[in-house]
Image: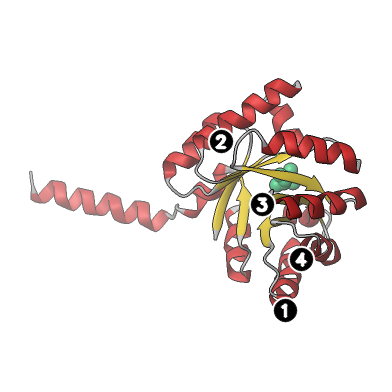
């Protein structure tokens, strides 16, 4: 299972990279705005800075929503660095754009997936990744993990090469349950990844080992 960090914050990306378990980064326009990044050239420079930190795919989302503009913007984003994956929203023109980029050999991440049908359409169009938003489904009392399960079954039935990128991950149980289901990738905050390594019995056990060692060596 690949671990992507869902942020545009360079410090957090560096921290996750230093942890040694990071496989990539996902961003979206809201996350870029949160870091105060605006203007085409600043946005491109920020994506380049992210690519220089990580070993792996970096999703950069188009703002355009019509086909021609999405192609132009996506090609400009892809030219920034070979790690860039063009992130395309699940709309009709987006499906056409996924097909275009697929035929050009440019990686894509189809975002804002909230149903199995949307995931199937993106896979048919040749998306590299589909991003079902599990946390946002949970927010409206719909089990996001059920969607991951449905997409897993469909993709396995037909051997689609499209990878399931569980997005809108909020906490460590989301990661564990996505791993149990067989999501190919999860993207979430650094806090959710770090929570995976914590257990109170580990802390208690380590304190006891160190205490006993100190006594024996005093
Ligand atoms: O990047 C897309 C997705 O991961 C957003 O997550 O927490 O804003 O629902 P969230």
Please tell me in which quarter of the rendered image ligand 1 is found: top right
Disc 1 to disc 4, C-alpha distance: 15 Å
- Which numbered disc flags the more N-terminal residue, 3 or 2? 2
User: Would you say the residues marked 1 and 4 are in contact, meaning their CB atoms lie under 8 Å apart?
Assistant: no
Which residue lies at the image location 50% right of the left edge and 43% below the top edge?
A: 55
Instruction: Residue 196 in the image: state x and y as whole percent.
Output: 50, 54
Q: Is mark 1 on a helix, strand or loop?
A: helix
- Which numbered disc flags the more N-terminal residue, 1 or 4? 4
Q: Quadrant of the rendered structure where residue 153 is? A: bottom right
Q: What element carries label 2?
A: helix
Disc 4 to disc 2, C-alpha distance: 30 Å
In the image: residue 183, left or right of residue 101: left
Which residue lies at the image location 75% right of the left edge and 61% below the top edge?
A: 144
The label number, if any, that marks residue 51 in the structure image: 2
What residue is shown with label 4?
A: 147
Q: What element carries label 4?
A: helix
Disc 3 to disc 2, C-alpha distance: 22 Å
Which residue lies at the image location 52% right of the left edge and 30% below the top edge?
A: 11
What residue is shown with label 3?
A: 169
């Amino acid at each position: 299972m690949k671990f992507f960090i869902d942020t545009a914050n360079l410090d957090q990306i560096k921290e996750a990279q230093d942890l040694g378990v990071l496989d990539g980064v996902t961003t979206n326009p809201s996350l870029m705005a949160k870091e105060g990044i605006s203007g085409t050239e600043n946005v491109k420079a920020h994506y380049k800075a992210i690519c220089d930190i990580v070993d792996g795919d970096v999703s950069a989302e188009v703002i355009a929503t019509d086909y021609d503009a999405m192609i132009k913007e996506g090609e400009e984003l892809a030219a920034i660095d070979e790690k860039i994956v063009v992130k395309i929203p699940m709309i009709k023109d987006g499906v056409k754009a996924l097909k275009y980029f697929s035929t050009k050999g440019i990686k894509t991440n189809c975002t804002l997936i909230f149903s199995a049908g949307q995931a199937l359409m993106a896979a048919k169009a040749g998306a590299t990744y589909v991003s079902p938003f599990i946390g946002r489904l949970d927010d409206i009392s719909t089990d996001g993990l059920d969607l991951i399960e449905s997409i897993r079954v469909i993709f396995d039935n037909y051997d689609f090469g499209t990878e399931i990128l569980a997005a809108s991950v909020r906490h460590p149980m989301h990661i564990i349950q996505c791993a149990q289901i067989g999501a190919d990738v999860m993207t979430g905050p650094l806090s959710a990844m770090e929570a995976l390594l914590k257990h109170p019995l580990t802390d208690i056990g380590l304190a006891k080992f160190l205490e006993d060692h100190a006594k024996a060596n005093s």
